[in-house]
Image (cartoon, rainbow, N blue to C red):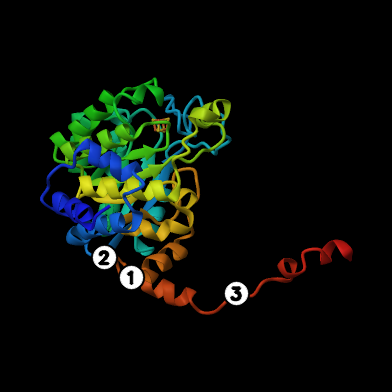
Amino acid sequence: MESTFYHRLTATSLDEELLSDSCCDKILSASEVELLPLLDAAYQVRKTYFQNTVQLHILNNAQNGNCPEDCHYCVQAKTATTDIDTYSLKPEAEVLAEAERAYQSGAYRYCVVMSGRGPSPKRVTQLAQLIQTVKSRYPIEVCLSVGLIDEPAARTLKEAGLDRLNHNLNTSESHYPKICSTHTYQDRMDTLRAAQAVGLACCSGVIVGMGEENSDLIRVAKELRRLEVASIPVNFFLPIDGTQLSESFTRTPQLVPTTLTPDYCLRVLCLYRLLNPSAEIRVAAGREHHLRGMEVMALYPANSMFLEGYLNATGKESLRTLQMIEDAGFTVETNSEISEQLQTEQGGVLLKELEMLRPRMKSNT
Ligand code: SF4
């Protein structure tokens, strides 16, 4: 593809004009659109709004499992058979201790996530008190993910000091019935509208690799643009045994999303950046699993990531992530304690222990 194509992508995005669906489709799948110039086109947009900074998020899975919903991708769904540790809302002391740890790790934002369809009014009051306490103790942004909420609940949380509400669209309206039957795409839109009605900033993203078409991903990116969400987590489906979706992919391999190569994942991130130039684009779940050796390239379109794992899957350990960011010439947008951690870690090279050097020795003795 001519270099003018890539320049036009950047210019169109920076002029806040919309790319056509056919251009978006080309970005995702046309072999003549080369990855490196595409990454550069997206990077020019990212640099304009976020320079070389990276925001880090630490996620607290504050209530796990036992969810009455049936989201086919989720290990916490009532229909999932995955063996996970389930627990109801963690005690306040535990949530506060993790807020402190998030702050001290240099996280920009502390994301509290609860399983379930949505909180009761009593639970909303309890969460509001918790948010007030976290905000009064630590200068850290707080984002909450609690399922479906209405406007009065959103107002209570906003008044308590909540910075953001997370509620992912996950996929397009037409694909939604294939990934969930207990609530609708419209229910999710209503929650985002309720949050916006009371002035709460919204974080809402997508899960790539759930058997959708390119057109579904394009529609979600454009819908999030219309909603003017502040932050867009781009998740790549992790095929965990026991979820409905993983099981159906096993039963009918032709449904397996073969498209989740590192190249494709990076193209999706570029598309989301170009369509949402000023939004925080987060490379979220599946970063390590699907991007593999290309992981660092995600920093060119994306300006945010989770520091240490996701809801029920571990991530790359935090110091490795910090080192990757620094090595690529990006800087973490945070307090100064992170660089001290890095210096401590860089002390020396770890030598292999004897069992690794001579694995059979033990059985011979
Ligand atoms: S995604 Fe949320 S609502 Fe859906 S099953 Fe999982 S915890 Fe429940």
Residue positioned 44% across, 43% down in the render: 260
- In this rendering, the answer to whether 61 lies above or below 96 is above
Q: Position of residue 55 (x, y in %)?
A: 30, 58
Which is closer to the viewer, label 3 or label 1? 1
Q: Amino acid at mark 1?
A: Gly
Of all residues, the one furthest to the right in this rendering is: 365
Residue 108 in sight here:
no
Q: Are marks 2 and 3 in contact (CB under 8 Å)?
A: no
- In this rendering, the answer to whether 151 lies above or below 264 is above
Q: What residue does disc 3 label?
A: 350
State which quadrant residue 26 falls in.
top left
Q: Amino acid at mark 2?
A: Asn
Q: Amino acid at mark 3?
A: Leu
Mark 3: give few (<14), some (14-19) or many (20+) Cα within 10 Å: few
Q: Cα distance, mark 1 to mark 2?
A: 8 Å
Q: What residue does disc 2 label?
A: 52
Mark 1: give few (<14), some (14-19) or many (20+) Cα within 10 Å: few
Of all residues, the one furthest to the left in this rendering is: 15
Q: Earlier in the sequence, mark 3 or mark 1?
A: 1
Residue positioned 48% across, 41% down in the render: 238
Mark 2: give few (<14), some (14-19) or many (20+) Cα within 10 Å: some
The residue nearer to you, when weighing 120 against 360, is 360
Q: Judging from the image, what secondary structure is the residue with disc 3 in?
A: loop
Q: What residue does disc 1 label?
A: 329
Q: Judging from the image, what secondary structure is the residue with disc 1 in?
A: loop
Q: Are marks 1 and 2 in contact (CB under 8 Å)?
A: yes
Residue 321 in sight here:
yes
Residue positioned 33% across, 53% down in the render: 34
State which quadrant residue 210 falls in.
top left
